Image (cartoon, grey):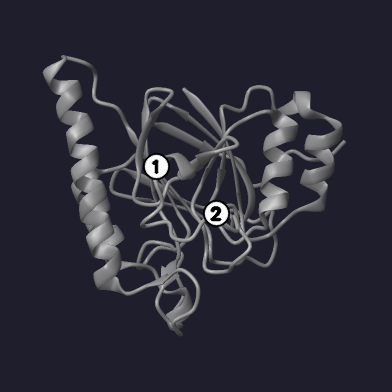
Amino acid sequence: MIKILAVSDNPLKSLENSVSDFPDRYKDIDVLVSCGDLDRSYVELISESIKKDIFFVSGNHPGELDDDEWYLSKSNAPKTVRYINGRKDMHCRVIVFNNYIFAGFNGSLWYNGGYNQHTEKEMSKVVKSVIRKVAWHRLQDKVLNYPQKEVIVLSHAPVEGVHDLRDQAHRGFKCFRAFIEKVQPLLWMHGHIHLNDSRNDQVSVTGKTTIVNVFGCKIIEVDKRHVRVSAHCRIDK
């Protein structure tokens, strides 16, 4: 079982106050996940308050967790750079945590050449790389006669046809569907798609995969193949 506090796109002052004033409410959280487009100070405040590491992917706006002045290029940075101060940049990475395989994809679909925008072809290369990494982990488990680990994905952009919009900036990636068909992850968390109210619930199921728009804040509990998503974090006093 794993319990995730997930945040994305919309910083909530009420959540800041809650984790600062009542950190014990979050003691059963296993990891903090950020799906992007949040200022690094906001996410780090939450992490430091609840004393949990951050698994993150960056969105398509600068000023995020990977925005260290000496952090010149995610693609060329040494591995040690991507694991600093409890922050784990998950873009194109696969990590085993709490007996689950975590994978991540940053940015959005290309629309004007700005920060962290990828063409479908570029992201397809990343997806294929991550599929190979997941396959390697699963092969290791098979050889060692271990139970197959479930896969949890975090991305900024949505999957094409699930929660995405018609405009170029907010369309999902087609190659994410290929990942779902090949890997069949248990859970996919994304951001980028804004809702009218952070308390709204946007959860869909594609095949065996539960897809969650994290916008604002969500608490997600995974137990075996059962996924439970709270529509909003319990931040009332």
Q: Is residue 15 left or right of residue 167?
A: right
Q: Could you tell me which residue is drawn at 32 percent across and 32 percent down?
A: 150
Contact flag, marks 2 and 1 (Cβ < 8 Å) = no
Question: In this rendering, is residue 13 above or below 161?
Answer: above
Q: Quadrant of the C terminus?
A: top right
Q: Could you tell me which residue is drawn at 27 percent across and 57 percent down?
A: 126
Name the residue at the left extreme: 143
Ranked by sequence position, the earlier of labels 2 and 1 is 2
Spatial separation of the CA atoms under disc 2 and disc 1:
13 Å
Q: Nearer the viewer, residue 192 or 110?
A: 110
Q: Which residue is mark 1?
A: 79
Q: Nearer the viewer, residue 221 or 149?
A: 149
Q: Is residue 187 left or right of residue 138?
A: right
User: Dot 2: what SS?
Assistant: loop
Q: Which residue is mark 2?
A: 66
**Residue 225 visible in the current orientation:** no
The amino acid marked with disc number 2 is Asp
Q: Could you tell me which residue is drawn at 60 percent across and 62 percent down?
A: 37
Q: Nearer the viewer, residue 106 or 25?
A: 106
Q: Position of residue 230 (x, y in %)?
A: 61, 41
The amino acid marked with disc number 1 is Lys
Question: In this rendering, is residue 204 above or below 185?
Answer: below
User: Dot 1: what SS?
Assistant: helix
